[in-house]
Each structure stands twice: as structure tokens, then as C-alpha cells.
Image: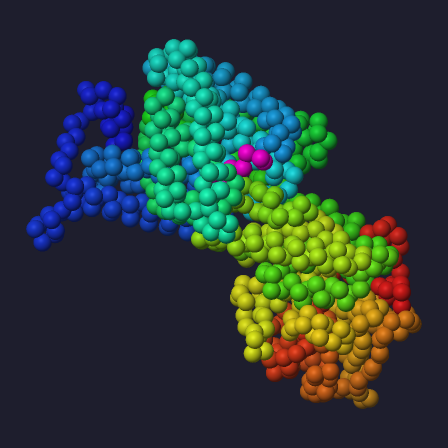
Amino acid sequence: MGYTPVQYLADAASGNSSETPLVCYAATMMSLNGMLQDENPLDFTFPIFLFQLLVILLTSRITAMILRPLRQPRYISEILGGFILGPTLMGRLPAFALTIFPFRSLLVIDSMSSIGLVFFMFIVGVEIDPDVVRRVVRRSIFVTCAALIGPVLIGILAGLMLHGRIQDGTNRGAFATFFCSILCVTSFSVLARILADLKLMASDIGRLVLSSAMIMNGVAWVLMIFSTALAQSKGKALSAIWAVVSGGLFSVAVYMAMRRAARWVQKRTPEGEEVAELHLCVILVGVMVAAFAADTIGTHAIFGAFVYGLAVPNGPLGELLIDKIGAFIEGLLLPLFFAISGFRTNLFSIVDAGAAWLLLIVVLAAMMTKVAGSMLASFYMERPFRDGISLGLLLNTKGVIELIMLNIGWDKRVLRDQTFTILVIISVVTTTMISPLVKVAAKPSRRFVAYKRRTIRWWNPESELRMLVCAHSSREVPSLISLLDISHPTKRSPFFLYSLYLVELTGRASTLFVVNTNSSASSSSTTLDSHRAAPNAGGGFIRHQTESEHISHAFESYEQHAGGVSVQSLTAFSQYSSMHEDIIALSEDKHCALILLPFHKHQTIDGTMEVTHPAIRTLNQNVLAGASCSVGILIDRSLAGTGARAQRYNVALVFIGGPDDREALAYADRLATHPGVALTVVRFLPCIGSPPPVVDVAGENDDECLAQFQAGGGGEAEYVERMVGNAEETVAMLREMEGRYDLYIVGIGKGMSSPFTAGLKDWSECEELGPIGDLLASPDFGSRSSVLVLQSGKYGEESGEDINGGTVAVSMTANPGR
């Protein structure tokens, strides 16, 4: 059996010189004088390291691009990149191995990867919030115990039984304990990424599985420290126990000292400003001190760095530390660790296929017992059957942490080459399997089936109307509040508003690791998928926290001054590509009847409309396409300022026909009861001799809805009919209305076909607004009037029960006061 290059170095360090070739090191060969001196750059230490780094990064990035359609964790592409460069593939070519990765250069790569690993574990520790465990500590401990019973028993028994076959020559107890720790561990980083992709980060099962994984990993680390100490002490149990105890004392001492130091730094940092560079340097130096101390007492350097990071308190200090070093560590140094792991993984070292199958069976059995234990725990806690399966699968997530532990076992000679290779391959295979299985098992059920009447028209007027109001900045809030205010919430017909502050998550994968429920100063505020890591570089956390507080305070102030309004403020950190999923999931979970979105353009000082962010338009389109409830987009042109000046709003509803226009009519009907609103309903009808409009009137008739509106009585509303024959006359009629109104309300008219708007779509700039909405929002139409476009919910045309269980008549009953 051949040695990998890294094995030569490890055996040399352990004193097995009889099997190790002599590797000479020349201090004068650090850097070359230049190729003009007939020197080969790859013969010198520093140039070849730079070249190796380029090769490793290029290989991992190409592998990630190939695997991107499979939506696998980054860990998979990184470790596969190491396989490609290692002795399994390219390393078998003598020219490649001896030229690109010669023996003498591997010590530098190994050292740099160890530094990267130390700081990576520090980052992971910073991102973990211990409060997550404390909030659900009883349930987490119960789930952890139920899930670990099987893996612990299987690991110990299988380790003792298989030791003689696959680990001959190593300590039997050390291998059994270490194998047990591998079966117990859960990769926290991969788990958090899966939860974020499934939008479960802020859910109850998300918090439960994160806290259980943290406790489970703590047990795994204790077992690993014990096993490695047992191997190093030649089977002396007392020495191993002392290593565990000293590791615990070290953890407590570091945690308490770092907590005090971090709080001291925070007190001396003015609010709203970044931590001083000197303090940051001292903290980062402390990472190396903690790693050195942990390695000295017999645990491991990365354990010391992890505990040190765990002690960093929640807040801007942790965010700034991640911001400073995160990209460099994860982008440049961590791939070196995966490359070293690939060099150590040699498929040709597997000489006993039976042993490989036995290990695979044992690992799968442990995974099944973990799922079974989670299901029993869920049953005891009276949770759904699917939640138990999801919990067990999520706790079986493997990844970087398991690979780190396997490398520690290889370094400490607890694992031999064959066992190491088999376990790494099993880790990769199970990780690729777990991700899709979890996504199927944890797919949210449509719990809102009984709440299908999620539109304005179908809502019981004397029940609470639930609305999700989204904002990307505090600049959009005054107009949204003005619109809500003239919608006339009362104690008899109240509103429950969920104000959702949307923040673009542009950071690294590590920014998805931990949930933080204190994003706002308000006690009533919560956070959806919010995380400790800063979403943007440099002070991003502080800026978004301040913006979140401003939005929350604005809605709370409105709640205090308006009658019949309840508000709950939330913040969602997400990428724009998946932000619509957060909005739709939240609207379904809260049974909202209407989602209000801001337009992707805002009005500037000179009255023109400027794009806020191009991705907001795509976000709005995705919400319109996927939402089951009604959706409204507000094109604001100083709606709040108009109301403040005039104390009266002139509102026009443009009605052509169809479900979206009927939904717009229902919303306008609410506005008509407001004493400060003068509503005009303008219905477009075909001229005599013109072809009738082709509209979708499934389940309801436009004439009946308008008749109900006119018979409502009360309020100030005017009904006007206009005869038009084609799109040109429609545009001319709208031109006549220009400048008379502060707000236009129109339906999007999705799926509609009408001679009134025929051909307008060809000239539309924003098709998601519909032909009439796009025309009213265009800069050519006018700069003073705001526009609200509405799309009816998908179930708006069905009959049945409303959310209160009563029978809903096909009628306009939005405003009982009219």
C-alpha cells in the first residue's frame, strides 16, 4: 500500500523514519531571483505555494460551478476538488504530483490550512448564539438524548467489534470512542444552510434542531477529545479523563475572560461607531493564544479557537470580526484544508471491500436510529409525524465539522488510511443524500387550506383583516402608513398588520448560521431568518438595525394613534432571488388577506421616478406569481405629503372588469367610509356598436358587484360610467382624469383580454402593473398621483367557507358602515 505525500510528513513527525524518505529543506530556496537567472519558480517554496493555491482555488470553483444545478452544499464541491488533486485522480500522475505538489511543499500547505481552520472555527464560534439553546433548553436536551442513544450504542459496539479488522495496531478504546463521536456529530454550518434554503431558520423546528445540534456537537467533541487523548497516552484512561477535565476548565476560563474583555471593548466603543482597530487586533491575536493554549493542554488548537469565538457576545463586535476576516479565511485558506483532506483520501488504499460495506451499514444504522429517536421525541411532544422525520434527517447532516474531526483522528493516528478514506466518502455520500431528503420531508404543508378566502372581498367585514406590509427602507413607510390610514381601520373592522423590513443578504454562507430574535428595540418585534453576521460590509449590521428600529417605531406610533390597528414588526434577511419565498411563506403562516409591496422606483426631489434596486421589480413579480392571497403594489408619488397638506384625499377607481378589478373595488369600498376620502368609481363601458369586452367573470358578475357597491349607502362615493370603444379612447379618457386625484386604484387584470386595453401591453414598461396601472405609473401621465395596483388572490373566485367558518355570499360586503 502506497503512502500519500502528507503521510510521509506525518510518519516523519511520529518517528517512523524507516518508512519515510529523507526530505531536505534549504532556507535559501524560499524565493527565486527571477526566471531570467534560469531558475524554475516551482523549485522555490513561496512561488510554488502561490501556484498551488491558484490550482486549488481554480479546481474547487470549477467543481462548484458544475455542481451548482444540484444545489449541493459548498462542502461537497470543495472536498471533491481535493479528491481530484489528491492521489485518487491527478495525484496518481507522477509528473503532476512531483511537479505541482512535491513532498517538500506540503508542510507549508498543511500549516496554512491549519491557520485557516483555526480562524474558521473561531468564526463559527462567533456566529453561534448560546441563547438559542437556553430558549428551548428542555426540549433540546430531550430531543438530543432520544436521538443519541442509538448512535452512541452502535458506535461503541461497532467500534469494538470492527477494530481488529480495520484498525489493527491502534488503541481499541480510542477507536471505539472516536467512531462514536463521528456518528454523533452534526455539521452546524451545512445544517444552517439547509434550514435557510427551506425557510425554516426562524421556525420552531428550526430553532429546536439548531439547539439540539449544538448540544449534540458538544457531546461529540467531548468524545473526540477523550479518544485522541486515549490514543496519545497509549490507553491510559486517567490521562484521557484529565484531558477532558482540563478542556472543560479551559473552556470556562476562556469564556469568562473573553466575555469580560469583549464587554469592556463594547463599553468603550461609541454607539454607532466601529470598534477601534487596536481592539480588533488584540482580539484576533487572542485567537492564536487560545489555540496555542488548547493544543498545549492536550485538546486541540481548533477547540480553543472555537470556545474563544463562542465567548464573543452578540452584537456589532462579532459582526465586525466576521466582516474583517471571514471572506479571506473562507475564500482562500479554508480550501487548503479541503485540499489536504483530498491528499489524505486515497480510494486505492481501500483493500478490504467488506470492511467498507460494514462501515457503511453501521453508519446508515446509526442514522436510522437517530431518525427513530427524533420521531419518538416528536411523538412525546405531540408534534406532527413529518416534523419527527424532518428533525431526524436534519440532525444527520454531515459536512465540514465531521471532516475536521476525521482529520484530527488521522493526525492523532486514531484512524488508519483505509478507515479515514471510507469515512470521508461515506460523509460525502450521506451529505448529498440528506439535503434532497430533508427538502422533501420538511416541505411545508399547505396549512392554510381552510383559509382559502384570503382576499379583501371574501373577508368577513367584522373580523380582523390581516395584512403584510413590506418595506425596503424607512423612506417607504410614511406613504404605506398613509394608505393604511385612509383604508379606515376601526374597532369594529380592525386591521392586524405585519410590517416586514426586507434586507438583502449579500454576505457569505456563514451569515446564515444563527437566528437572533432581537433585531429591534421593540419588545413586540421579532426577526424572520435574521442572523448575527452582518449582511453587508462595514457597519452594515448597525445600519440595518437602526433602519429596522425606525420602521418598527413608525408602525408602533401609528398603532398607538389609530383605532382598531394592531402591529407586529418583523425583519427578514434574505437574498433577492429567494426573498419572495419569505414573503409568501409568512403571508400563508399568518393567514394574511393582502400583501402590500413598494414599487421598485421612488420619486426624487425633481419629481422623476428613479430605480431603487433592479432586483425589487423581480421580487414583486415573483410575489405576484406565487402568492395565494391578494397582492398590492404602491407606486408612491408623495401620498403622505398630499394628505398632510390637504387633509383630504381624492381617490379614483378605474374599473374595467374581472377578478382583479373587483378586488380593487372591494379595497376602494373600505376607503369610501373614511371621512377624508372622496372616492370616484369610473367604469369603462363599450360604446354602442363596439365589441363587448372579454372578461373573466367566473363565479361572480361585475354588474352584481357594482350594484352591491352602489347600494351600500353611507360614505362619500361617486359612480361614473364612461363609454370607450378601443385602447386609444381609453388612454384619452385617462388623460382627461389627469391631475384630479391623489390616488388611483386599479386591478392588474392578469389573464384579461379586453378591447379597452388591446395593444397597450406592447408599450408597457412594467407589465406586472397591468396595462392601466403601467400607463398611470408612467412618467408621461403625471408626477403627482400615486397608484395602487391590486391582484386578487388565487382563491378569490371560489365559493365556500371564509376564515371564520361562516358561509360567504357572492356579494360586496367589505364595509358594513356604508
Whether residue 433 appears in this view of the structure is no
Residue 421 in picture, x, y percent from top left? 38, 29
Q: In this view, does 166 lie to the left or right of 216?
A: left
Residue 113 in picture, x, y percent from top left? 32, 37
Residue placed at 61% from the left, 37% from the top? 207
Q: Measured along the vertical axis of the image, is residue 703 above or below residue 507?
A: below
Q: Quadrant of residue 352?
A: top left
Q: In which quarter of the image is the N terminus?
A: top left
Residue placed at 38% from the left, 30% from the top? 290
Q: Does the magenta stretch include residue 458?
A: no
Q: Is residue 672 left or right of residue 730?
A: right
Residue placed at 59% from the left, 61% from the top? 473
Q: Which of 516 and 69 is in front in this view?
A: 516
Q: Which of 548 and 438 is in front in this view?
A: 548
Residue segment shown in magenta? 125-132
Whether residue 343 appears in this view of the structure is yes
Q: Measured along the vertical axis of the image, is residue 112 above or below residue 449?
A: above
Residue 490 in picture, x, y percent from top left? 83, 59
Q: Main secondary structure of the magenta part?
A: helix
Residue placed at 72% from the left, 66% from the top? 483
- How many tags in the picture? 0
Q: Is residue 743 left or right of residue 16?
A: right
Q: Nearer the viewer, residue 598 or 23?
A: 598
Q: Does the magenta stretch include residue 130?
A: yes
Residue 198 in picture, x, y percent from top left? 59, 46
